[in-house]
Image: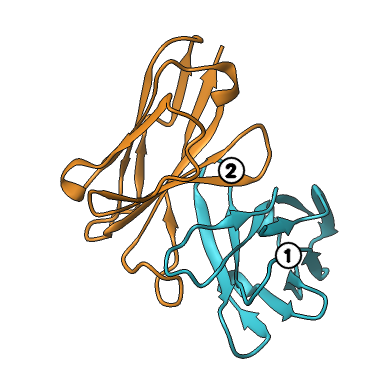
Chain colours: A cyan, B orange
């Protein structure tokens, strides 16, 4: 069965410091991996995706993620956090089945302090 | 372009009542998905429409849930009768293409359903 794990319910970081939000996955085969962000009272917004190719994927708002097949991880990173990055972050995957039936993690709340 | 619109944003109903959630996808998006997040857990897939046809409804919890997409435009999700465990945030998403390679999902703001 496919699954996504986000081991941290919350990540706290000071503004200007680098941030990492962790994601690991379990699947047989080669998944498509995604990060979505949810700001308060808003819907999920697409940040970035890994389909194939370069393991380092760059996305919106300065975020990037690194696909590591041996560790089955897809951690989200940003070199310098902003207070406005504070939100709920979801990692997700789906298999290349043609349709976007995503399997999500439980979400990680990122809190960036001034 | 207008985004995915969901109505209502909040709904509070009593156990046993009926609620209908509506989703208006982005114009021209044939693919429409419903997802649900219950009590701070993971977001789970409910079902997928391609135009007016249900492509995959394997995530629907039980027969108290009925989704429709008449005419292939907007979609409704009806819960009848509602139970306490149905409380959560219901998200709708749409995409132009089926696959994720070129067309990520666009999500609405969700409907927060509370069953008391």
Distance in Å between CA atoms under marks 1 and 2: 26 Å
**What percent of the width, then of the height, locates residue A63?**
65, 72
**What percent of the width, then of the height, locates residue B71?**
15, 45
Q: Secondary structure at mark 2?
A: loop
Q: Quadrant of residue B24?
A: top left
The mark lying in front, picked from 1 and 2, is 1
Q: Are marks 1 and 2 on the same chain?
A: yes
Neighbour tally class for label 2: few under 14, some 14-19, many 20 plus, Cα within 10 Å = few
Neighbour tally class for label 1: few under 14, some 14-19, many 20 plus, Cα within 10 Å = many
Q: Residue at x 67, y 76 (%)?
A: A64
Q: Which residue is mark 1?
A: A25
Image quarter in which the N terminus of chain A is found: bottom right
Chain letter of the residue carrying label 1: A
Q: Is residue A41 left or right of residue B2?
A: right
Front residue of this view, candidates B97 and B66: B66
Front residue of this view, candidates A66 and A41: A66
Q: Specify whether residue A85 is in view.
A: yes
**What percent of the width, then of the height, locates residue A88?**
66, 50
Task: Compare marks 1 and 2 and give the one earlier in the sequence.
Answer: 1
Front residue of this view, candidates A98 and B114: A98
Q: Which residue is mark 2?
A: A40
């Amino acid at each position: 069965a496919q699954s996504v794990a986000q081991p941290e319910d919350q990540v706290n970081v000071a503004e200007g410091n680098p941030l990492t939000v962790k994601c690991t996955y379990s699947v047989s085969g080669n998944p498509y991996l995604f990060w979505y962000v949810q700001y308060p009272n808003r819907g999920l917004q697409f940040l970035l995706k890994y389909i194939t190719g370069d393991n380092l994927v760059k996305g919106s708002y300065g975020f990037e993620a690194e696909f590591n097949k041996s560790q089955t991880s897809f951690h989200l990173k940003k070199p310098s956090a902003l207070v406005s990055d504070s939100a709920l972050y979801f990692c997700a995957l789906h298999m290349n089945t043609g349709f976007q039936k995503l399997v999500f993690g439980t979400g990680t709340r990122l809190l960036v302090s001034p | 372009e207008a985004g995915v619109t969901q109505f209502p944003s909040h709904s509070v109903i009593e156990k046993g009542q009926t609620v209908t959630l509506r989703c208006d996808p982005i114009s021209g998006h044939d693919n429409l998905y419903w997802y649900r997040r219950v009590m701070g857990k993971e977001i789970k897939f409910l079902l997928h429409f391609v135009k007016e046809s249900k492509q995959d409804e394997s995530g629907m919890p039980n027969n108290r849930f009925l989704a429709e997409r008449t005419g292939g435009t907007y979609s409704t999700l009806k819960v009848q009768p509602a139970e306490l465990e149905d409380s959560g945030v219901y998200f709708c998403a749409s995409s132009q293409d089926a696959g994720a390679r070129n067309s990520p999902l666009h999500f609405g703001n969700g409907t927060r359903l509370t069953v008391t």
